[in-house]
Image (tube, helix red, strand yellow):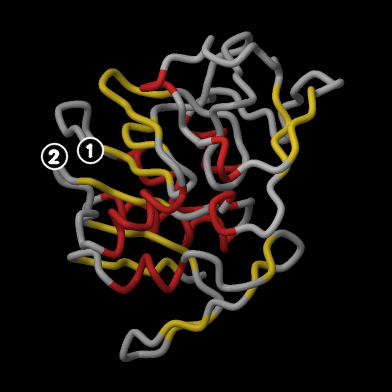
Amino acid sequence: MAKNAKCTIVEADEIVEVGEIIPENVHLQGVYVDRVTKSTTSKEIEKVKFLESTDALLKSVTGVGDAAHRRIKIIKRAAKELKDGRYVNLGIGMPLAAPAFVPERVEVILQSENGILGMGRYPKPGEGDPDLINPGKETVTINLGASFFGSHESFGMIRAGRINLTILGALQVSARGDLANFMLPGKVKGIGGAMDLVGNPSKTKVIVT
C-alpha cells in the first residue's frame, strides 16, 4: 500500500541512524517514504482472544439454542474438508472454529490474508502479541516454520491458486453457488478479499446460517 500512496507516513517504534538496518532487513525502501514519526503510545491489542476449550470457542461463534446446533453441524461438515498438507484460508466467525474438529494427525497450513502463512492457535494468557493477529484482529500465535509477508504477497498466493481451500461466511448464496457478500453487519463494510478468495482456490466452501 505504501508503495502506491501519494504520501506515505511511517510511524515507527524506534528511529535509528542510516546504515543501522542491514540491507536484507529493509522491507520498505526510503524512496517510498515521505515522513517518519516516532510512535508516542504503546501498541494495544484491539481484540484479545485467548486459547479456550472447544465448547467455549463454539459458543462464542455459534451462540446458543437451536440455531447453534445447526451451526455446529455446519462447522463439523466444513472441518471434513481440511485434509493433511493443505493450505487453507479461513474467514471470520464460524470458519475459524473448523480446525477444532480436525484430528491431531492431520496437519493443515493456515494462511491469514493479512500476511501469515502457518498461523497457529489462539494464545494463552501472557502470550498475546499486538503484531500477531488474524483478519478479525484477534490475537493468534504462529506455528514452527511460519512466515510473514505483505497483503500484496498474500493475495498473490490466493490469485495464483496456491491456496487449496477457502472456507468463508456469506450473507447470501444461491443454489448454484453464486455469492453475495457485500458487508458484515456491525463489523466490516465492503467485499474485502472475498472475491479474490473465491476466484482461484481449488475448492471454495461457503458457510451460511
Where is mark 1, residue-wise? 108
- 86 with respect to 158 (left or right): left
Q: Nearer the viewer, residue 42 or 121?
A: 42
For the residue marked with disc 2, what is the amino acid?
Gly
Q: Amino acid at mark 1?
A: Val
Residue under the point 28% across and 49% down: 88
Task: Give whichever of discs 1 and 2 has the lower sequence position.
Answer: 2
Residue 106 at what x, y percent from top left?
A: 16, 33
Q: Quadrant of residue 9?
A: top right
* Identity of the residue drawn at 36% across and 59% down: 167
Q: Which residue is mark 2?
A: 85
Q: Position of residue 208 (x, y in %)?
A: 47, 71
174 is higher (above) or lower (below) than 187:
below
Residue 93 placed where, x, y %? 54, 52
The residue lying furthest to the right in this view is 40
The reply to whether dot 1 and dot 2 touch (C-beta < 8 Å) is: yes
Q: Which type of secondary structure does the marked residue at label 1 adopt? A: loop
Residue at the image point whose x is 22% and y is 66% from the top: 203
Above or below, 69 relative to 208: above
